[in-house]
Image: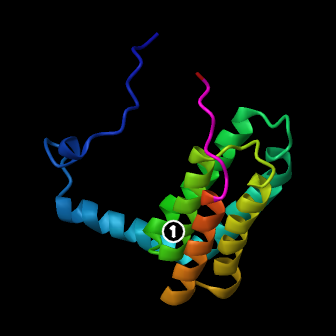
Amino acid sequence: MGRLRSRRPRSLLEKVSGPKAVSIDKLVERGEAAAQEVRATFGEFLKLRVSELEGMLKPLTAPDAPNALWTQFYTVVHDIRGSGALARNLAVIEFCVSLERLLSERDPADARMQMALLSHINALNLVISRGTPDKASQALLAAELSRAVDSLPLRRNSD
């Protein structure tokens, strides 16, 4: 049996050095092309991922929801935020940062958690249905989401 090769991605230094070097300009060009593709398909991506969040909401807020489901939910939110950054959608980024804060800081057992999660999902749905809100509307909505997060008790330490 042959020796297994590592599938580790090449570092940036490895990509721009040696016999298989790619110019930094070429790498930037590839990155720009990838970002442009994300921007072009972001609306459909956002619809799909927000639909996944909606589907997880009820089982997530059940008393016996497994930790793995919370992790999966957080992962989808984080994915949306990262893609929102590539798509340059500041509203999506801001709403996801607030949602990540809710998920990481607040007590998931609180009875109001489902409404707070739903408020964030609704904010993302607003972007889907109406596009990115103007700065004033975005700031107002972000402030309301922040209040929803702040109204919930902090997580209890599991120590």
Tell me the quarter of the picture where residue 13 sits. Answer: top left
The answer to whether residue 38 is left or right of residue 5 is right
Q: Is residue 134 visible?
A: no
Q: Which residues are magenta?
A: 151-158
Residue type at tag 1: Glu
Q: Residue at x 35, y 70 (%)?
A: 32
> Residue visible at 57% across and 86% down?
137
Q: Position of residue 21 (x, y in %)?
A: 18, 48
Query: With 6 as the anchor, is 144 left or right in this view?
Result: right
Verify whether residue 152 appears in magenta.
Answer: yes
Task: List x then y, in percent, for residue 128.
Answer: 67, 78
Task: Please name the colour scheme applied to the rendered image.
Answer: rainbow
Q: Position of residue 67 (x, y in %)?
A: 71, 34
Which residue position holds label 1? 94
Residue 9 located left or right of residue 89 = left
Q: Residues within 10 Å of mark 1 (few under 14, many from 20)?
A: some
Query: Residue 124 location in percent, x, y?
Result: 66, 71
Q: Main secondary structure of the magenta part?
A: loop
